[in-house]
Image: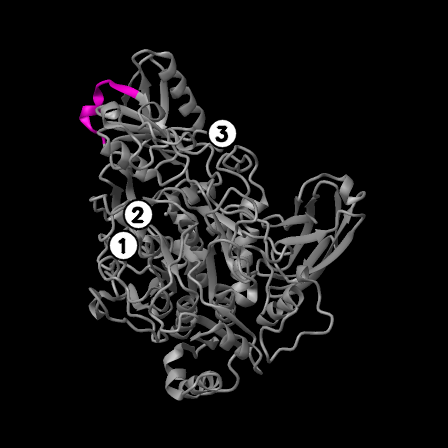
């Protein structure tokens, strides 16, 4: 997604930052003793004590045992061979930032039709005294969404700090934002000193992303809208009384428009997670993920850091990524993390496009209405008004400096998405003197609108509508158009539908774990924004907004984080695995009208796209049964999946169980296409519902496979009681003859007359 430029920060051009992971801390060593131990590794390979100390960036002393240091490849190789070292891997900047109607919509999806009196938030005291740690780009503390009015004192268990820096001091923390830190060492080791002209050297958010995600998770109810006329109503976080702890780990990439692309270095993220756990957070919300190929678990800082967090009772939630709709693009793959895909809500912004032949096309727009657009304008296709030297391969895409002013001035220009930023296309039309823009896809890719806050009047249309407009332009000697006023429409019948950008499975690291786990609202979500950033993040956009409509799995993640906070408030004794299980097994695969959720092409959105389905917070508070798991279970899973001991104090068994035997709320297995296959896996459920209870199982078999569950009935006498069962999946014929597809899916559901405890089944055909 971006190119990285080497820094002249280090004199040794071959040195870069490596993370040395040592597993768990043993005994009760002091912070000084731990740092001295880490220093001893460096002292054994460096020329002097001074060079060893200068090379050490972070010493992870809390839940994580390890350190980050500047090393050469040879030095890193030597350390990797030392006793007690689990893994050594470079700290790369390949992670990047992946958002009110959304909470009202989820109430509607659950059948409450907006009557919040039945919603979980009230029963959970709106998350009061639950602490959500946000790893992101910081926060804009002056936003009304972060007011502490009426909030009680902060828990005495909180151990965090309010770190001061540029344009941020201790007064910016309150009973809502109870802590704030920032992490730069990994970033500056690569890029050199931070350029303060486009980022604050403090927890203050210059970008807007961190402010947005924080207010989705825990923002106070505020009357808000976008640009004064769109999505008006009450913007609120799901856990509006939860406390926020801010960990700023993402920074702009140097270059033109630096805030368009942020980067988050592994060493900085691991330090933040280590501090967050020690500070006392209950939830970690991480809307960040690797770009490109996901790393293996032992070299994945988010996987390693959250594993230690989960051991300490922290619930970890991450975004799935924005590289859809291609397969195998989901990037957060650890089973102890809740990985969240993005879907739509029941709201859109209709704007009629009236062609000169009388045809009305319903587009969408986020442009405040300009009275000048009441009249008809000449309509042109960008490919017809380009400079003569524009390559045919990019024709019609309104790329920078491609339009001829003498041909585009005063006209409405039809642009195609193609390559480049959508916002930049509008800037090009404006540069060329165009009056307005219509933008649509030139290919039949999906049924989504390229809708953002363009810098001039603009309407977005679907690909088939763009084709219709092109045909009209070609057939009429004097084509014209009138762009109508946009209006906010709620109550759409097809929601939720999967967002086209949402990353998909299968899990490219461990095929026996389904990812993503869940989907939640992530398309055009209204939430707080940094007043240092325009709504588009472009430097050329002078507009300032307090609330922005923004999209991404980054916005879906804090919806799940808020839900986890509410569940933690209602069930403080539940483990991280129990909360994850409750969220996954109570999800729905249907839209508001009970029809199957669809994807961007209108097809059924399967488990590789939405995991178990769409988040339902109120159902999750009372799941009936849960699939629990411990830190030891995860270590055994790692033994089976990676054949590597992640914790030196826990030796792997000689014959570990299959990775599919992890007590996970979903089931994924891999079979060979060369012949018949039968696989048996084991699960354990815990009764957290009524007592006594009797559950029966119902099964939807994957195509070409039979599924048997034994026993078929589970009888519970009391809460907390556990029951084992086995799932046997068998091919009905040779797998090769079933179907030439990479996977097939089904499900099984435990039902007691009240609770539906549903688990998807994925059979990967290798």
Question: What is the C-alpha distance between the residues marked 3 and 2?
Answer: 35 Å
Which element type, helix, strand or loop, lies under badge 1? helix
Across and down, in percent, residue 24 comes to 53, 78
**Mark 1 closeness class: few <14, some 14–19, many ≥20 residues within 10 Å:** many
Q: Residue at x 30, y 54 (%)?
A: 255
Q: Which residue is mark 3?
A: 444
Q: CA distance from mark 2 to mark 1?
A: 8 Å
In terms of sequence position, does the residue under pointer 3 or pointer 2 come before the other? 2
Residue 145 is labelled as 1
The answer to whether the residues at label 1 and label 3 have Cβ atoms under 8 Å apart is no
Q: Which mark is residue 36?
A: none
> Where does the image place residue 673, in percent across and percent down from the top left?
75, 47
Residue at position x 62%, y 54% in the image:
666
- Percent position (x, y) of residue 411? 25, 23
Q: Assess whether mark 1 and mark 2 are in contact (beta carbons under 8 angstroms).
A: yes
Q: Is residue 373 magenta?
A: yes
How far is disc 1 from disc 3 in space, using C-alphas?
Answer: 40 Å
Which is in the foreground here, disc 3 or disc 2? 3
Q: Is residue 82 above or below residue 628?
A: below
Range of residues picked out in magenta: 369-379
Query: Quick one: label 3, few (<14), some, or many (20+) residues within 10 Å?
Result: few
Is residue 448 found left or right of 656 in the rendered image? left
Residue at image mark 2? 235
Q: Nearer the viewer, mark 1 or mark 3?
A: 3
Residue 208 visible from this viewpoint: no
Label 2 sits on a secondary structure element that is: strand
Q: Secondary structure at mark 3?
A: loop
For the residues labelled 3 and 2, say whether their Cβ atoms are less than 8 Å apart: no
Q: Residue at the spot x=37%, y=24% of the render?
A: 362
């Amino acid at each position: 997604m971006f190119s990285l430029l080497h820094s002249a920060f280090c004199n040794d051009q071959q040195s870069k930052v490596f993370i040395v992971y040592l597993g768990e801390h043993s005994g009760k060593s002091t912070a000084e003793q731990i740092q001295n131990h880490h220093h001893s590794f460096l002292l054994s390979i460096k020329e002097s004590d001074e060079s060893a100390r200068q090379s050490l960036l972070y010493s992870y002393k809390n839940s994580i045992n390890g350190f980050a240091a500047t090393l050469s490849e040879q030095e890193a190789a030597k350390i990797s061979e030392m006793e007690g070292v689990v893994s050594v891997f470079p700290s790369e900047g390949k992670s990047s930032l992946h958002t009110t109607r959304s909470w009202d919509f989820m109430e509607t999806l659950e059948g409450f039709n907006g009557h919040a009196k039945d919603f979980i938030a009230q029963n959970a005291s709106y998350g009061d005294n639950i602490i959500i740690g946000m790893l992101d780009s910081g926060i804009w503390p002056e936003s009304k969404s972060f007011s502490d009015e009426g909030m009680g004192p902060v828990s005495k268990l909180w151990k965090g700090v309010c770190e001061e820096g540029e344009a941020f001091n201790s007064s910016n923390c309150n009973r809502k934002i109870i802590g704030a830190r920032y992490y730069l060492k990994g970033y500056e080791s690569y890029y050199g000193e931070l350029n303060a002209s486009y980022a604050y050297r403090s927890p203050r958010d210059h970008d807007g992303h961190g402010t947005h995600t924080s207010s989705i998770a825990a923002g106070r109810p505020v009357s808000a809208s976008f640009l004064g006329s769109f999505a008006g109503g009450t913007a609120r976080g799901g856990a509006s009384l939860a406390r926020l702890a801010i960990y700023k780990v993402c920074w702009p990439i140097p270059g033109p428009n630096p805030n368009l692309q942020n980067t988050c270095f592994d060493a900085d993220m691991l330090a933040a997670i280590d501090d967050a756990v020690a500070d006392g957070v209950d939830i970690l919300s991480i809307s960040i993920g690797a770009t490109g190929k996901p790393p293996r678990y032992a070299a994945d800082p988010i996987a390693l850091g959250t594993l230690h967090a989960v051991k300490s009772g922290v619930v970890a939630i991450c975004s799935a990524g924005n590289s859809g709709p291609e397969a195998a693009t989901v990037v957060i793959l650890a089973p102890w993390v809740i990985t969240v895909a993005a879907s739509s809500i029941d709201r859109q912004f209709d704007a009629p496009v009236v062609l000169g032949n009388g045809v009305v096309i319903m587009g969408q727009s986020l442009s405040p209405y300009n009275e000048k657009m009441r009249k008809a304008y000449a309509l042109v296709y960008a490919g017809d008004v380009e400079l003569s030297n524009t390559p045919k391969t990019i024709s019609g895409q309104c790329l920078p400096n491609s339009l001829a002013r003498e041909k585009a001035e005063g006209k409405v220009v039809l642009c195609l998405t193609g390559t480049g930023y959508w916002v930049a296309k509008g800037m090009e039309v404006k540069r060329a003197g165009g009056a307005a823009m219509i933008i649509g896809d030139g290919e039949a890719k999906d049924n989504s609108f390229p809708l953002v806050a363009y810098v001039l009047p603009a309407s977005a249309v679907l690909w088939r509508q763009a084709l219709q407009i092109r045909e009209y332009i070609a057939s009429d000697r004097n084509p014209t158009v009138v762009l109508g006023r946009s209006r906010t429409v709620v109550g759409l019948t097809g929601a939720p539908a999967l967002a086209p950008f949402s990353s998909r499975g299968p899990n490219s690291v461990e095929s026996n774990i389904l990812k993503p786990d869940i989907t939640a609202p992530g398309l055009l979500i209204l939430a707080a924004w940094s007043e240092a950033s325009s709504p588009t993040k472009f430097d050329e956009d002078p507009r300032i907004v307090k609330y922005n409509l923004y999209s991404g799995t980054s916005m879906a993640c804090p919806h799940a984080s808020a839900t986890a906070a509410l569940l933690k408030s209602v069930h403080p004794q539940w483990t991280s695995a129990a909360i994850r299980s409750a969220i996954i097994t109570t999800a729905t695969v249907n839209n508001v009208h009970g029809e199957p959720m669809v994807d961007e092409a209108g097809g059924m959105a399967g488990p590789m796209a939405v995991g178990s389905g769409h988040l339902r917070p109120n159902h999750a508070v009372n799941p009936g049964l849960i699939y629990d798991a411990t830190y030891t279970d995860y270590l055994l899973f790692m033994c089976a999946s990676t054949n590597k001991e992640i914790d030196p104090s826990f030796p792997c068994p000689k014959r570990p169980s299959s990775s599919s035997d992890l007590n996970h709320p979903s089931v994924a297995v891999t079979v060979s296409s060369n012949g018949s296959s039968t696989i048996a896996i084991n699960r354990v459920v815990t009764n957290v519902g009524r007592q006594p209870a009797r559950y029966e199982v119902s099964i939807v078999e994957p195509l070409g496979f039979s599924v048997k569950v034994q026993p078929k009935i589970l009888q519970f006498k009391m809460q907390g009681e556990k029951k084992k069962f086995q799932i046997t999946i068998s091919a009905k014929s040779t797998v090769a003859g079933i179907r030439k597809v990479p996977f097939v899916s089904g499900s099984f559901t435990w039902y007691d007359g009240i609770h539906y405890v549903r688990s998807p089944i994925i059979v990967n055909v290798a």
